[in-house]
Image (spheres, rainbow, N blue to C red):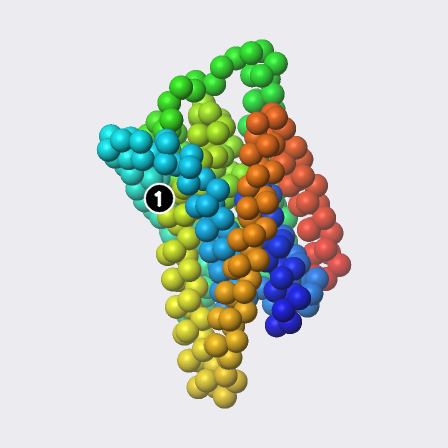
Amino acid sequence: MPILQVILLAIAQGLAELLPVSSSAHVVVAEKLMGLDPTTPQMTLLLVMLHTGTMFAVIVYFWTQWKSAYFASSAAFREFAIRVVAATALTGIIGYPLKKIIEKIAFPGAPKAEIEQLFGRLDIIAPALFAAGVLILIAGLRERRQLAESTPTLNEEGAILTLPQSLWMGAIQGVCLPFRGFSRSGATISTGMLAHASKHRAERFSFALAVVLTPPVVFVEAHRLLKATHEAAAAGTPIDLHATLITSLLGAVFAFLAGLVALKWLSSWLESGRWYLFGIYCILASVGVFILHTRGF
């Protein structure tokens, strides 16, 4: 893949991943417009490595906040760890069976069905974007109403989410996993806000969940690529694994840089009470994606 394409995809991923507008949808659309196949193991690994770049951006950006909120004492860390483990476990309990159900429905009778084969389907991405947009819009409008009424958010004083709030966020993250277009950050932060969490605490916890979730996803996609490499070699159409890894690492670096910019912008928007505008954007973007689908992309 040309380096310029990798850089463009990395910038799209880095900017969109940390904004609640679904980086996956933006990257898939960009790949389609570039004539690339988002469902191949090489492209799914590239996407995951782009996520890895943004994961490191999250760690750099949030470390000071996490240190003061989650590592201030052994008690604070214990509470945080319990919530992260519980939320991530619920993500797996919901996300994995949902993935298998979708594979069986989409590919009945197919012995090697993989949900990644659906990742290039714009007709699936469009409604997922729309659903995420509606959720963000509801949370954002509720926030504006509370600001207008000077109604304080419940449990505002705590640095850590309550266990029910963290479980709600973990549950919606599980729903997001199988769908490209259903913004993970947008859905989890909005769910936290609707569960009466401070938007800043919801943002902080949402990205902590992302850091925990990213390594297993990288492992799964790396394993998928290795498996595809062996199958391609046996079929006489070898995959250049070395070039794919180099390309993916380069993309991760650019995604990291773009992610830092996006995080700064996201925080400023969270502070200004304009969260609902991200929902409007997702809804409009879903219309654009559906139009591209009707035109053969």
Measured as percent of width and height from the top left, residue 200 is found at: 48, 29
Tell me which corner region of the image, top left, top right, bottom left or bottom right, holds residue 296: bottom right
Residue 68 in view in this figure? yes
Tell me which corner region of the image, top left, top right, bottom left or bottom right, holds residue 76: top left
Q: Is residue 151 above or below residue 64?
A: above
Q: Residue at x 49, y 15 (%)?
A: 152
Residue type pointed to by label 1: Thr
- Packing grade of label 1 (10 A; few <14, some 14-19, many >=20) is many
Measured as percent of width and height from the top left, residue 235 is found at: 48, 86
Left or right, 219 with reference to 180? left
Locate the C terminus by quadrant. bottom right
Q: Residue at x 70, y 62 (%)?
A: 33
Measured as percent of width and height from the top left, residue 232 is found at: 48, 81
User: Which is more toward the observer, 147 or 89?
Assistant: 147
Element under disc 1? helix
Q: How many marks?
A: 1
Residue 175 in view in this figure? no
Locate the N terminus by quadrant. bottom right
Tell me which corner region of the image, top left, top right, bottom left or bottom right, holds residue 282: top right
Residue farthest along the right direction in this orientation: 295
User: Which is more toward the observer, 14 or 137?
Assistant: 14
Residue farthest along the bottom direction in this orientation: 236
User: Which is more toward the observer, 293 or 109?
Assistant: 293
Q: Is residue 94 above or below residue 241?
A: above
Residue farthest along the front direction in this orientation: 64
Q: Residue under circle 1?
A: 88
User: Which is more toward the observer, 114 or 72?
Assistant: 72
Q: Residue at x 50, y 79 (%)?
A: 239
Left or right, 136 with reference to 49? right
Q: Residue at x 31, y 35 (%)?
A: 71
